Amino acid sequence: MSETISSSEGQQDNDSPWSEENMKDAPEFAGEKKFIKLEEIANLCDFDNMMIYGHGTASAGDGHEVVESIFDEGVKGFESLGSMIGEDRGSHTVGSTDLTDNAVGLWSPMDGELDFQKLKEKLDHWPHRDAKNVILMRFPIEYYYAYTEFPSERTRAYFTEHEDKNGQATNYIDRRFIIGNYDAETGEVELNPHFEPNITGDFKKELDERLAEVQEQTAERHEEVERGGLLRFERDDLGEEGAENDTDDTFDEWDEEDW
């Protein structure tokens, strides 16, 4: 039987949403599912410079197999058109890292103060498949990389790569960003045991490395584009006579390069 944990304390510094400090009012929940009211997620973590996203699932009631799988592995990246034929072409890893392929933006600081009543209304009337379970996620804005033309690079730092059940290398939204699952029928949030309330330590270091990899990849691609344009300009500038005498096949190779 589920109950609701009453969180009367303020911001917690503990590493787990159900640490001894957060669970002191309900010790009987040890080893069981943890449920809180939607507005009580404010007691679990800081939402300054964060974004809240949701991923609806079709399961409802006691059908928590999908929810539990997401808690364990993260939200699987969908195969978008861009990930199949665009910037990730040729990658051995499947699944888009464009967050908008996987989730819906629910709130950011640009929307003003976080209003849980408005958030609840959005969750209770989920537009896709009338989902009654919505995975709630919190993302730090500092790892949103805006300086790229590819959406999959903008949010790639939020994803981690591991094998799916079929052994295929797949992109997943990192489970540590998942707060829990909102149940529209009960109005409660089932907490994810793998959620990381604090972006610190090894977690922050890992995110810094992911962001740096994306920045480097974007920079390298831009350099290639600029160099390709320069080479083509030089070839055009040679004129017909120069082109006939040109024995360097660099230009032909560049034209055929897959980039």
Image (cartoon, rainbow, N blue to C red):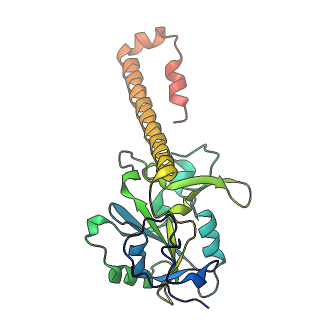
User: In the depicted view, which residue is nearer to us: 133 or 114?
Assistant: 114
Residue at the far right: name it.
166
- The answer to whether 218 is drawn above or below residue 170 in the figure is above
- The answer to whether 147 is drawn above or below residue 40 in the figure is above
Q: Residue 194's quadrant in the figure?
A: bottom right
Query: Residue 181 location in percent, x, y?
Result: 53, 77
Q: How many marks?
A: 0
Which residue is painted at 44% across and 60% down in the image? 198
Which residue is painted at 38% across and 23% down in the image? 230
Query: Residue 86 location in percent, x, y?
Result: 51, 47
- The answer to whether 105 is drawn above or below residue 31 in the figure is above
Tell me the quarter of the image containing the N terminus: bottom right
Which residue is painted at 32% across and 63% down in the image? 48
Q: Is residue 156 visible?
A: no
- The answer to whether 203 is drawn above or below residue 182 in the figure is above
Q: Is residue 39 visible?
A: yes
Query: Residue 15 location in percent, x, y?
Result: 50, 63
User: In the depicted view, which residue is nearer to us: 90 or 209?
Assistant: 209
Query: Residue 75 location in percent, x, y?
Result: 57, 65
In this image, 84 relative to 238: left or right? right
